[in-house]
Amino acid sequence: DGGITQSPKYLFRKEGQNVTLSCEQNLNHDAMYWYRQDPGQGLRLIYYSQIVNDFQKGDIAEGYSVSREKKESFPLTVTSAQKNPTAFYLCASSGPEYEQYFGPGTRLTVT
Amino acid sequence: AQSVTQPDIHITVSEGASLELRCNYSYGATPYLFWYVQSPGQGLQLLLKYFSGDTLVQGIKGFEAEFKRSQSSFNLRKPSVHWSDAAEYFCGNDNFGNEKLTFGTGTRLTIIP
């Protein structure tokens, strides 16, 4: 089955630690995205990548980093510089008609 | 900057009643418009999309949406809702097809028996 996988579904970390969220797709899509979702705020774009080895900051990139070494993979690192990292994180990839397909999400809790 | 507005934060509808969720977009001669649905704790699922052509588009799960350029709107409709339609709905716009979606803040739909 083609799709997007995110792991883990739930992640707990102590404040001050970096944490990496995984996102893999087997849809052969060039573009991939990371969003953060908080209650009542919809989805906010963190980073996106339209091609391997290239990525751009979204609206709320501070405190986050990404890499895109393979077409299938777009991991997101939440660094200790992110002031309020507890949130639901969604990864997506973009199809041929610009529609985005989403993974199931990772809920990160930092205490 | 482009924006997407969903004026209704929360809507409650009786099962079997009709539904209309509002979406307004700003900016853009060529909007690429989408509706997504999200169940609690899950990712987003694409319901339907509009690029051009017929302004009434059909989607999955019995949903449809109508694009009205004069009103900058792309409202989602369903003639008869089912309890399983309870979820959060997001409207999105990828202006000019630049592969960056702007989302509205969502509308939470509650279904009552």
Image: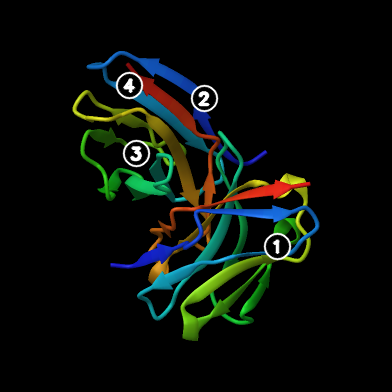
Position of the N terminus of chain A, as image quadrant, is top right
Counting residues from the N terminus, which is met first, the one under dot 4 or under dot 2?
A: 2
State the CA–CA distance, disc 4 to disc 1.
Answer: 39 Å
Q: Are marks 1 and 2 in contact (CB under 8 Å)?
A: no
State the CA–CA distance, disc 4 to disc 2.
Answer: 14 Å
Tell me the crowding category of disc 2: few under 14, some 14 to 19, or many 20 or more residues within 10 angstroms, Cα based: some
Q: Residue at label 1?
A: B63
Q: Residue at x 35, y 27 (%)?
A: A86
Tell me the crowding category of disc 1: few under 14, some 14 to 19, or many 20 or more residues within 10 angstroms, Cα based: some
Q: Position of residue B12 (x, y in %)?
A: 64, 53
Q: Residue at label 4?
A: A19
Say whether residue A46 is visible: yes
Q: Nearer the viewer, residue B18 or A60?
A: B18
Q: Residue at label 3?
A: A68
Q: Residue at label 2?
A: A9
Q: Residue at x 35, y 75 (%)?
A: B27
Callout 1: SS:
loop
Relative to residue A81, is residue B67 drawn left or right? right
